[in-house]
Image (cartoon, rainbow, N blue to C red):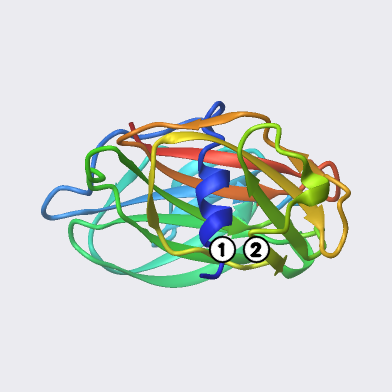
Amino acid sequence: MKLKFLTLLLAATAMTAACGDDDDNTGPEGEARVRVVHASPDAPDVDVLVDDSPVLTGVPYLATSDYLAVAPGSRNLKVNAAGTTTTVIDADVDLVDGIDYTVIASGLVAGIESIVLEDDNSEPAAGLARVRAIHGAASAPAVDIYVTAPDADLAVETPALADIELGDVADYIEAPAGDYQVRVTPTGTKTVVIDSGTLTLESGQVRTAIAVDAPGGGAPFDLLVLEDLN
């Protein structure tokens, strides 16, 4: 159950999307595909290197790359401050032929780390969407998530999920298309810090949503929604 409803509602916010979205399914035979998300709010622009070869340069906060074709196998991934040899992330990742991955540079720069996710970009079942969410807002407290019909009275609602903490990553779920409203409050309160308004989840979509800090860190918090498919 952990983050199930959070995943549904965050993914529904596909009214806006990060740059470099991709509409293919999974990588072709003989290669893996990797996209990179800069989600460290106080980190500078970054360069991304695979096996010490630059593949992306000058990536700003909240930017997302296209899926990049990478040879499968054990690969070294580095994230450097742009234009320097100062490495803030140095990770070895094992990439499987034909699989898509998302690598997120997450957390404040003093404790920055990589989150490596395996993506499922196959077509959802008819009438459904596939969604996934990550709590990546480094400065956010634990929160309660309310999932309701549009304009429902929050005062009489109970949270769909309570006490969600930084670093929680949801598994994919498939959810029916329809209209929803998500409201996020600090745990134990009714003080809304994120209000999605009326959101429409459409059939055939695959979405990854990341809760993020404002540039530089801290509030106001927001959602970075990646259009994985459709």
Observer able to see residue 62: no
* Disc sitting over residue 102 in the figure: none
On the rendered image, what quadrant is the C terminus found in? top left
Q: Nearer the viewer, residue 139 or 73?
A: 139
Residue for point 74% across, 49% down: 184
**What separation in Å lies between label 2 and label 1 (alpha carbons)?**
7 Å
User: Residue under circle 2?
Assistant: 161
Point out the frontmost of discs 2 and 1.
2
Q: Which of 204 and 224 is in front in this view?
A: 204
- Give the mark, 2 or 1, whose residue is nearer the N terminus: 1
Residue 60: where, in percent of width, then height? Answer: 65, 38
From the viewer's perspective, tell me whether residue 228 is left or right of residue 109: left
Question: Callout 1: 10 Å neighbours few (<14), some, many (20+)?
Answer: many
Quadrant assignment, res 23: top left
Q: Nearer the viewer, residue 221 or 37?
A: 221
Residue for point 83% across, 41% down: 220
User: Residue under circle 1?
Assistant: 3
Residue for point 51% across, 70% down: 1
Residue 19: where, in percent of width, then height? Answer: 51, 30
Quadrant assignment, res 89: bottom right
Q: Do the residues labelled 2 and 1 touch (CB within 8 Å)?
A: yes
Residue for point 30% across, 36% down: 204
Observer able to see residue 33: yes
Residue 13: where, in percent of width, then height? Answer: 56, 35
Look at label 2 and name its amino acid.
Answer: Leu
Q: What element carries label 2?
A: strand
Q: Which residue lies furthest to the front in this view?
A: 156
